[in-house]
Image: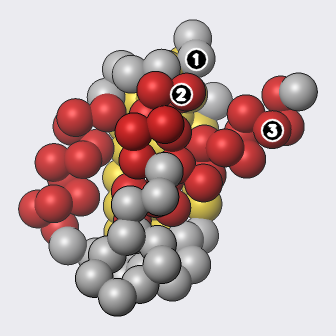
Amino acid sequence: MEYTFNPRGVCAHSLSFEIEDNKVKNVHFYGGCNGNLKGIATLVEGMPIEQVRDKLSGIQCGYKSTSCPDQLAQALNQILDAKE
C-alpha cells in the first residue's frame, strides 16, 4: 500500500513510501537535502517497519527538534498505531 505524509518542521515538504509485507519500500522525500535523503531511502529499503521506526526516531537536524528521518519514523508510527 502506498502512503503520503506531509512532514512538519523540516525542509522536505512531502514524503511517500510503500509498505509491502510489513517492509518499507520506495521511499521518496520531496525537498530537503537530496543526496542525504536518497541515501536514507536506499538504506531503509526492504527493512521491517518497526526497525526503520526505531532506528530513525528522535534524530534531530541542527537546532530543530526533528529531522526528515525522524519524520519518516513518525509517519511509520502512525501506520503502526492504526493497525492496532
| Residue hosting label 3 | 81
Q: Amino acid at mark 2?
A: Ile
Q: Amino acid at mark 1?
A: Asn
| Residue hosting label 2 | 49
Q: Quadrant of the N terminus?
A: top right
Q: CA distance from mark 1 to mark 3?
A: 13 Å
Residue 22: mark in rendering: 1
- Residue at image coords 49%, 37%: 54
- Residue at image coords 46%, 72%: 66
- The residue carrying pointer 1 sits among few (fewer than 14), some (14 to 19) or many (20 or more) residues within 10 Å by Cα, namely few
Q: Position of residue 46 (x, y in %)?
A: 36, 20
Q: Quadrant of residue 11?
A: bottom left
- Residue at image coords 41%, 47%: 56
Q: Amino acid at mark 3?
A: Asp
Residues marked 2 and 1 touching at CB (< 8 Å): yes
Whether residue 16 is visible, yes or no, is no
Q: Is residue 52 left or right of residue 33?
A: right
Q: CA distance from mark 2 to mark 3?
A: 12 Å
**Residue at disc 2, secondary structure:** helix
**Residue at disc 3, secondary structure:** helix
Dot 1 or dot 3: first in sequence order is 1
Q: CA distance from mark 2 to mark 1?
A: 6 Å
Q: How is the image coloured?
A: secondary structure
Q: Is residue 35 left or right of residue 71?
A: left
